[in-house]
């Protein structure tokens, strides 16, 4: 009986591993890496010969998104999405850990803020939401995850094929074994959860040790600031302010971070807390609460945060966490 159980266990484990060197798309990928970047075929064949297929990430990017069930609709009703979202993002625990993180790396934050013009609390807030200040950088093997998502059918094959290529090149450049790197279910890496393409484009060796490591707090802090600056962050400008409107549900104007308005166009809307000295175009951000819609003016810097993660709720949680951290901390 014990022998049979052992055999079944070994069989199941063996099913997890796959030799991708026999996969047509992988062969084409290896050919392109050899031709375009002069990689040794033997090195790439070794990498792809034993890959553990990552089933959870694959489910997350399935070809067809499953329709919500009745139970899901009951659990997540039409209104109240913001309350459900923010209660896990802006918490007392995360605020306090953010303050501790700022204190621990205060000299780095000060230098980074002077260099890039991005306030320390916003960088800290992003790290807090992305990885809980480094406590949760991900448990998935990045190489296996990106290989799975690049070559198994899903709705983002092209994107993950490009990210896999970037990851291999980064690993080779920084002399890292790609098999040893852990990250998110999407292949994001480090305290700021950068995808390999962002790692390559915005990563900063701020501690001057000759390599960019997004697991290192100094490099991660500077890299996030660099990302925001390169995507248009404006120094000393506002991010967002809450506004008032008539009624409980807002439908008068189109909302979202991609639609801009001159403030004079928005009749019946004004800042809730006095004037707001921001003269550029604004976005209207609607947060769906169970009893009413909360409405905000969003400035250009809010839009910049959505370049990091294309979600208005994400950007608003960064903004609110940053504000809460800033109340209790001064750099």
Image (cartoon, helix red, strand yellow):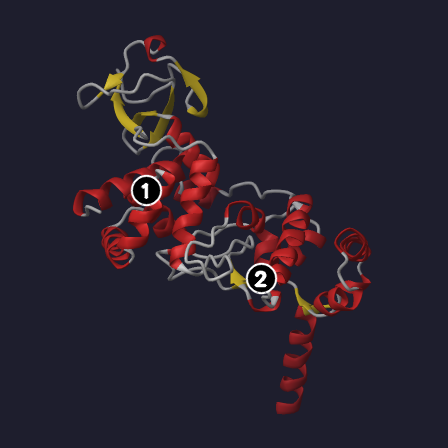
Please determine whether, in this image, residue 7 is positioned above or below residue 200.
Answer: below
Q: CA distance from mark 1 to mark 2?
A: 28 Å
Question: What residue lies at 38% left-to-right and 31% top-to-bottom?
Answer: 302
The residue at the point 66 percent across, 57 percent down is 148
Quarter of the image with the N terminus is: bottom right
Relative to 147, 210 lies left or right: left
In what element is the residue under mark 2? loop
Answer left or right for 285 relative to 106.
right
Find numbered disc 1 in the image and state the secondary structure of the residue it sits on. Answer: helix
The tag on residue 224 is none
| 88 left or right of 99 in image | right
Task: Answer above or below: position of 269 versus 327.
Answer: above
Q: Residues within 10 Å of mark 2 (few under 14, many from 20)?
A: few
Q: Is residue 1 visible?
A: no
Q: Residue furthest bottom?
A: 2
Instruction: Residue 111: tell me if it is visible.
Output: yes
> Residue at left 28%, top 22%?
248
Image marks 1 and 2: residues in contact by CB distance under 8 Å: no
318 relative to 246 in the view: left or right: right
User: Quadrant of the rendered structure where residue 46 is?
Assistant: bottom right
Residue at figure coordinates x 17%, y 20% from the top left: 274
Instruction: State the residue in front, 81 or 274.
Output: 274
The residue carrying pointer 1 sits among few (fewer than 14), some (14 to 19) or many (20 or more) residues within 10 Å by Cα, namely few
Which residue is nearer to you in this view: 142 or 177? Answer: 177
Residue 170, horizontal then vertical, whole percent: 60, 57
Q: How far from the left and from the top, in percent, is residue 195? A: 54, 50
The disc, 1 or 2, on the residue closer to the chain's N-terminal end is 1
Q: Position of residue 105 (x, y in %)?
A: 29, 57
- Which of these two is toward me, 278 or 59? 278
Q: Which residue is mark 2?
A: 174
Q: Which residue is mark 1?
A: 114
Select label 1 or label 2 by which is in front.
1
């Amino acid at each position: 009986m014990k022998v049979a159980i052992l055999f079944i266990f070994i069989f199941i484990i063996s099913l997890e591993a796959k030799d991708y060197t026999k996969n047509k798309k992988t062969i084409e990928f290896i050919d392109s890496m050899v031709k375009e970047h002069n990689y040794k075929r033997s090195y790439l064949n070794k990498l792809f010969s034993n890959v553990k297929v990552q089933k959870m990430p694959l489910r997350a990017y399935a070809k067809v998104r499953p329709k919500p069930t009745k139970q899901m609709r009951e659990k997540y009703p039409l209104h109240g999405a913001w309350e459900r979202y923010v209660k896990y993002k802006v918490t007392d625990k995360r605020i306090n850990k953010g303050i501790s993180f700022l204190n621990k790396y205060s000299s780095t934050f000060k230098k980074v803020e002077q260099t890039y013009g991005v306030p320390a609390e916003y960088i800290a807030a992003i790290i807090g939401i992305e990885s809980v200040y480094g406590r949760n950088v991900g448990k998935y093997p990045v190489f296996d995850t990106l290989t799975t998502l690049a070559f198994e059918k899903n709705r983002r094959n092209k994107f993950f094929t490009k990210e896999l290529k970037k990851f291999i090149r980064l690993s080779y450049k920084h002399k890292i074994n790609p098999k040893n790197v852990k990250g998110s279910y999407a292949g994001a890496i480090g305290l700021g959860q950068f995808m390999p393409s962002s790692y390559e484009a915005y990563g900063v060796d701020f501690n001057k040790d000759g390599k960019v490591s997004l697991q290192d707090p100094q490099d991660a802090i500077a890299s996030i600031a660099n990302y925001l600056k390169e995507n248009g962050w404006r120094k000393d400008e506002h991010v967002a302010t809450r506004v008032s409107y008539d009624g409980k549900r807002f439908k008068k104007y189109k909302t979202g971070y991609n639609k801009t308005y001159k403030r004079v166009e928005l009749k019946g809307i004004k800042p809730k807390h006095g004037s707001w000295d921001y003269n550029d175009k604004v976005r209207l951000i609607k947060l769906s609460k169970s009893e009413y819609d909360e409405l905000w003016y969003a400035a250009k810097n809010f839009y910049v945060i959505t370049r990091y993660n294309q979600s208005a709720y994400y950007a608003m949680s960064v903004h609110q966490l940053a504000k809460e951290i800033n109340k209790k901390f001064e750099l």
